[in-house]
Image: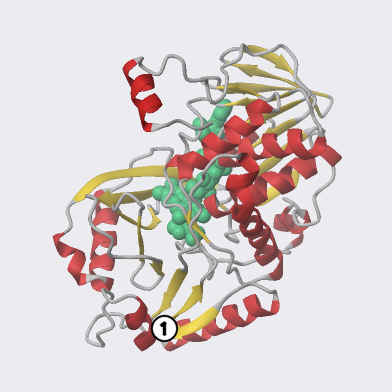
Amino acid sequence: MKYSIFSLLKQGLKDNKEWPEAWSSPIIKSRYDVVIIGGGGHGLATAYYLAKEHGVKNIAVLEKGYIGGGNTARNTTIVRSNYLWDESAMLYQHSLDLWNGLSQDLNYNVMFSARGVYNLGHTLQEMRDIERRVNANVINGITAEVVLADEIKKRIPLINISKNVRYPIMGASYQSTGGVARHDAVAWGFARAAAALGVDIVEQCEVTAMDIDNSKIVGLNTTKGYVATNQVGCVAAGHSSVLAEMANVRLPIESHPLQAFVSEPMKAVLDTVVMSNAVHGYISQSDKGDLVIGAGIDSYNSYSQRGSPHVIEHTAAAILELFPAFSRARMNRQWGGIVDTTPDACPIISKTNVEGLYFNCGWGTGGFKATPGSGHVFASTLANDSPHPLAVPFAIERFYNGHLIDEHGAAGVAH
Ligand code: FAD
Ligand code: PYC
């Protein structure tokens, strides 16, 4: 839909009353063919691809708050696919491929910007790990290169490559095809496109219990009443184990706060993404001009969306070691999300031993980048009642048979 500046003004004066809703707020039905619990990016993407690619008609997304209000709109928007192991590299690359056409596909600008991502190395061992990961990426057809400190300085003039710091920068892996996207636009774009295909997006609707009969899901209790259904996809990030407990399913997930903060907006000073696991901080600049900063999880388990001040202090110190010039930037806002971490830093995309009940969770500190790919493979898993080929290695069974996929090294944020 196109608006001229005059029609925008006219609409503004009318209090936007004539603007169409981006997605409707339907009354919840008593029965759905598929219910997705969780209206974050992953849940909405799942519903969208279920409707679009698998022709499923009667779908609801139930969200206890507002859509995108979980980690989706709390994350720092970094998108990349440079993971070490084939299984995860393929999954994240599938997502990156979808990011590239996503605005066109959804007819909604998700502002994906491939401005490149640097993962810095500060020790010989880190550089060896970087070389190994870059080699693995190249073998898998994933864009990646090793860049040394002098070249990094040429490309990012404000970065500090002095040898006279705690962790001097030796080099980095660089993925030019990675970047950032506008997080809430991703939720809104998927919501709008899913609603246009007939998906009911029901906000302020918390799932409080699962009705399981003879090891088969038959319905859900919600704060808006009982809903009958035989297929449920749980996509609830930090609350995944709360849902699992309702079904007596055990998940190897810990929920932790993960914080981030942004500075006041400033002129364009950083046109790429820089991450460091050794000093442990990462930074990019949003299109608005804010510096977007984060680091590691708070080490304790919690369902709070706040986090502790010492983590903020540590993060700020790390960023100032990399970018001393930012010492004069004033910080504007801080927040936290609840991330769902697994022992191998990889997601769980899986059926369960309850018929019709599936989980897509465990994305921890790094699931934003996976949003379209995760929704795409989970939709296929639900529609076919059989894991999508890319989802096979991510079944819950790996925690019983030992086929873990250790991606702690590639996780941008240690956890
Ligand atoms: P969410 O967006 O959290 O959605 C889950 C939804 O489920 C929530 O809206 C919640 O309200 C709802 N829900 C829970 N329980 C119920 C219930 N009982 N009934 C109904 N609804 C329920 N990843 C990256 O790739 N790059 C990054 O730069 C990055 N930075 C991050 C920075 C921070 C500070 C945080 C917190 C996370 C970051 N992540 C990043 C991780 C990323 O945000 C998540 O992995 C991803 O957004 C998870 O999406 P989701 O849709 O699964 O979860
Ligand atoms: O997984 O790339 C990532 C990431 C960056 C910030 C938080 N997670």
Tally of marks: 1
The secondary element bearing badge 1 is classed as strand
Q: Residue at x 75, y 15 (%)?
A: 31
Q: Is residue 271 above or below residue 387?
A: below
The quarter of the rendered structure image containing the N terminus is top right
- 91 displayed left or right of 114: right
Q: Residue at x 78, y 40 (%)?
A: 53
Q: Is residue 317 above or below residue 64?
A: below
Nearer to us in this view, 21 or 236? 21
Q: How is the image coloured?
A: secondary structure
x%, y% of residue 260?
A: 34, 50
x%, y% of residue 360?
A: 66, 44
Nearer to us in this view, 78 or 365? 78
Q: Residue at x 50, y 83 (%)?
A: 146
x%, y% of residue 133?
A: 58, 78
x%, y% of residue 244?
A: 64, 36
Nearer to us in this view, 295 or 20? 20
Identify the residue under disc 1: 171
- 257 displayed left or right of 382: left
Residue 301 in view in this figure: no
Residue 81 in view in this figure: yes
Q: Amino acid at mark 1?
A: Gly
Q: Residue at x 49, y 77 (%)?
A: 173
Mark 1 Cα shell of 10 Å, populated few (<14), some (14-19), many (≥20): many
Quadrant of residue 218 within the rendered picture: top right
Q: Is mark 1 within 8 Å of ligand 2?
A: no
The residue furthest left is: 328
